Amino acid sequence: MHDLQALNGATIAFDLDGTLVDTAPDLVGALNMILAEEGFPALPFDEVRLMVGRGARALLERGFAAAGQPLDALTAPKLVERFIAVYLDRIAQESAPFPGVVETLAHLRTAGARLVVCTNKLTNLSVALLDALDLLSAFDAVIGADRSPAAKPDPVHVLTAIQAVGGDPRRAVMVGDSINDALVAVRAKVPALLVSFGYTEDPVETLGGDLVIHSFLDVPKACIDLLTSCPRPNTGL
């Protein structure tokens, strides 16, 4: 690993789905179970994979639209509740950290970085997933959409996550895989580090991140480069 001294005291906020963990198999499985219960055929994995990462309701809305039946506003709350129950029951049945995640998080913590999860996933689902994968102890806090006044791409989400671990937005990096991660970083005036192996329907290079990496093992060096080469002023919350 690189000399990580520059990361001591810095805050690194991570998206969850598509960045830390490949959760698509279990999310698609839960979606297809709901579709089956409602009388619709399963959707192909490759078609649904890129729908992941924007929250349960968004996934259901896009899934039902792809099945040819827009999600009914009256029944949506019950279907979302059912989806969450089904997903929680299989939270880590097939999901797994992306290669390099476990060792990289350990190196970052040893270097003195503050690590926080900033995700549009509900906090209880995020904690259950991280705990099932033995990743929970790597983070100082987990801030799901329900623990922030607004969800990504609203900048308050990542600023809330940084504040939750006692961090300074002027020494923080947002690591993600999607347009929401790029936008939340730009709006919060923190650098955006994007991974190329996540869930985005548009080429990751077009999303407006400051750097794109192709291996999670490159996170430490990329964060050091961003913190030392493009510091951004920030007034905080």
Image: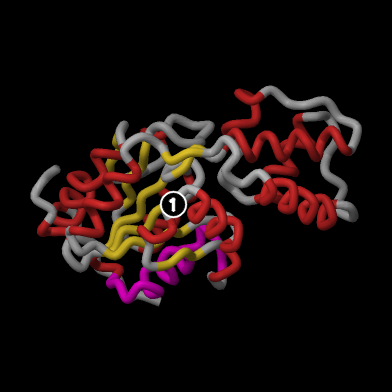
The magenta span reads: 150-168
From the image, tell me which residue sits under label 1: 134
Mark 1 packing: few (<14 Cα in 10 Å), some, or many (20+)?
few
On the rendered structure, is 191 left or right of 187? left
Q: Quadrant of residue 65?
A: top right
Residue 122, above or below 89: below
Quadrant position of the N terminus in the picture = top left
Q: Residue at x 24, y 39 (%)?
A: 218
**Disc 1 marks which amino acid?**
Asp
Q: Is residue 55 magenta?
A: no
Q: Residue at x 40, y 77 (%)?
A: 237
**SS class of the residue under badge 1?**
loop
On the rendered structure, is 222 left or right of 50? left
Q: Relative to the observer, which residue lies in front, 232 or 194?
A: 194
Q: Residue at x 21, y 45 (%)?
A: 222
Q: Estimate the x, y position of residue 124 in percent, counting from the top left.
A: 60, 62
Q: Estimate the x, y position of residue 32 in percent, counting from the top left.
A: 75, 33
Q: Is residue 163 magenta?
A: yes
On the rendered structure, is 81 left or right of 214? right
Q: Estimate the x, y position of residue 205 in percent, counting from the top left.
A: 36, 33
Q: Residue at x 69, y 48 (%)?
A: 89
